[in-house]
């Protein structure tokens, strides 16, 4: 998966175009998405609240149908253990219109760490989150609402 605005030169990731973009669209983002996407701690190389080097603990896809099972509303919840194994980041996407989950060779690669992630505006009130893992894994979710939380693990 190719990211729209975060570049990799073979050595380092360059976020400058991405952060300029997020700043330019921040007024289009719902408050929880704005708070998370502009928080540099969610992208940092080190820390408990960054997704970098976090490992996915669970992915839950939920579909709710109307009484005739003809209309559906989908949501996705992702839980990550942070790189220091001190807390769990929960990302919840509501009114999901599409999603892609891809992990490569789970029998050889027992876990995948997040390398980088980016948000973008697809259209009015529709957003995308792309997450790239090592070992060629990726997640892409298009959604209308977003919530996030970080909870410290009990020691």
Image (cartoon, grey):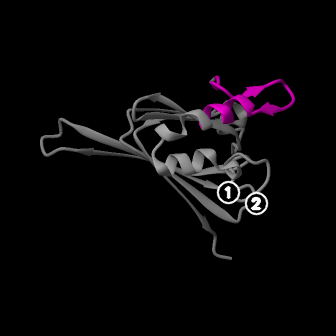
Left or right, residue 44 beside residue 129: right
- Whether the residues at callouts 2 and 1 have beta carbons within 8 Å, the answer is no
Q: Position of residue 79 (x, y in %)?
A: 55, 54
Q: Which of the numbered marks, if any, corresponds to residue 49?
A: 1
Which is nearer the N-term, disc 2 or disc 1? 1
Q: Residue at the location (48% across, 41% down)?
A: 29
How crowded is the residue under tag 2: few (<14 C-alpha within 10 Å), some, or many (20+)? few
Picture coordinates of residue 147, whole percent (x, y): 47, 52
Name the quarter where the N terminus is drawn. Answer: top right
Q: Secondary structure at mark 2?
A: loop
Query: Is the residue 122 above or below the residue 26 in the image?
Result: above
Whether 144 is drawn above or below 2: the answer is below
Residue 84 in the figure: left or right of residue 76? right
Considering every residue shown, the one lying at the far bottom of the view is: 155
User: Can you tell which of label 2 and label 1 is closer to the viewer?
Assistant: 1
Decide if residue 5 is on the left or right side of residue 16.
left
The part of the image, by quadrant, that contains residue 131 is: top right
Between 44 and 125, the one nearer to me in the picture: 125
In the image, which residues are magenta? Answer: 2-22
Local packing at callout 1 (Cα closer than 10 Å; few below 14, some 14-19, many 20+) is many
Residue 151's disc is none
Position of residue 49 relative to residue 2, above or below, is below
Q: Nearer the viewer, residue 71 or 59?
A: 71
- Does the stretch in magenta take in 13? yes
- The one nearer the camera, 22 or 116, is 22
Quadrant assignment for the C terminus: bottom right
Taking the spot 65% from the left edge, 50% from the top edge, the residue there is 39
Q: Which residue bears the numbered disc 2?
A: 84
Mark 1 element type: loop
- The reply to whether residue 75 is visible in this rendering is yes
Across and down, in percent, residue 89 comes to 59, 57
């Amino acid at each position: 998966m190719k990211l729209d605005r975060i570049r990799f030169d073979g050595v380092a990731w360059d976020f400058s175009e991405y952060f300029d973009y997020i700043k330019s669209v921040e007024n289009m983002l719902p408050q929880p998405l704005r708070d998370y996407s502009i928080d540099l701690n969610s992208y940092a190389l080190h820390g408990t609240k960054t997704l970098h080097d976090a490992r996915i603990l669970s992915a839950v896809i939920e579909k709710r149908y109307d009484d005739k099972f003809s209309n559906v509303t989908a949501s996705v919840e992702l839980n990550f253990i942070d790189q220091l194994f001190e807390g769990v980041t929960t990302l919840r996407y509501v009114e999901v219109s599409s999603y892609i989950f891809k992990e490569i060779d789970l029998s050889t690669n027992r876990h995948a760490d997040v390398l980088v992630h980016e948000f973008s505006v697809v259209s009015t009130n529709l957003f995308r989150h792309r997450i790239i893992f090592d070992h060629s894994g990726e997640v892409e979710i298009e959604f209308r609402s977003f919530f996030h939380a970080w909870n410290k693990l009990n020691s």
